[in-house]
């Protein structure tokens, strides 16, 4: 669609914000992406980072990483070199609009309904490395050890 979402923090840029507004007006992009992700999910043996797939696909082991808005703002502020207050406002706006999009398109309440998830991990006090190690352990123990050989 002409956007260049290559860098971390793109969603917080003016271009990212414009795209979010466009998605609110026209759900075509979200539906196309979700259909493509569903095809990947059906093939299996894939890791998807998606806010919609837990509700849209019956396949897979679904994980929600939970962290407070305050901690998210702190992490965003550190990453992007902005104030925590500005980061909190960006998150509030982006999350609110994203929730609107998905509730309108699919009827679920992002961040409120955890029913499709197999695991909800509180990552508030974990580093990214600790999150990776924890999830690796869970996947190794719960999923890979149960696969038929």
Image (cartoon, rainbow, N blue to C red):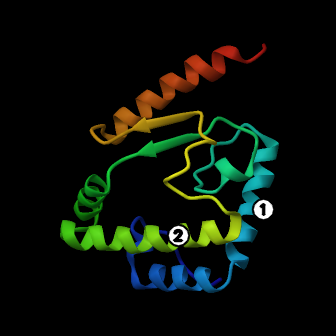
- Residue placed at 56% from the left, 72% from the top? 100
- Measured as percent of width and height from the top left, residue 104 is found at 65, 72
| Mark seen at residue 61 | none
Counting residues from the start of the chain, the first of labels 1 and 2 encountered is: 1
Q: At numbered mark 1, what does the secondary structure look like: helix, strand or loop?
A: helix
Is residue 128 positioned above or below 39 on the image?
Answer: above
Q: Quadrant of residue 78?
A: bottom left
Horizontal arrangement in the rendering, residue 85 relative to residue 2 (left or right) = left
- Measured as percent of width and height from the top left, residue 20 is found at 53, 79
| Neighbour tally class for label 1: few under 14, some 14-19, many 20 plus, Cα within 10 Å | some
Say which quadrant the N terminus sits in.
bottom right
Give the residue at mark 2.
98
Is there any visible trace of residue 141 in the rendered image? yes
- Residue placed at 45% from the left, 67% from the top? 95
Task: Give the CA separation, mark 1 to mark 2.
Answer: 18 Å
Which mark is nearer the camera, 1 or 2?
2
Q: At numbered mark 2, what does the secondary structure look like: helix, strand or loop?
A: helix
Give the residue at mark 1.
35
- Measured as percent of width and height from the top left, residue 69 is found at 31, 57
Is residue 33 positioned above or below 12 on the image?
Answer: above
Say which quadrant the C terminus sits in.
top right
């Amino acid at each position: 669609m002409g956007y260049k979402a290559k860098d971390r923090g793109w969603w917080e840029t003016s271009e990212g914000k414009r795209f979010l507004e466009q998605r609110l007006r026209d759900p075509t992009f979200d539906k196309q992406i979700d259909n493509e992700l569903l095809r990947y999910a059906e093939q299996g043996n894939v890791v998807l980072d998606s806010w919609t797939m837990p509700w849209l696909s019956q396949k897979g082991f679904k994980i929600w990483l939970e962290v407070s808005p305050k901690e998210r703002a702190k992490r965003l502020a550190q990453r992007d070199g902005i104030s925590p207050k500005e980061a909190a406002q960006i998150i509030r706006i982006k999350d609110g609009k994203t929730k609107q999009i998905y509730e309108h398109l699919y009827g679920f309440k992002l961040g409120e309904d955890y029913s499709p998830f197999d695991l909800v991990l509180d990552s508030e006090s974990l580093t990214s490395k600790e999150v990776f190690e924890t999830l690796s352990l869970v996947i190794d123990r719960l999923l890979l050890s149960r696969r038929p050989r």
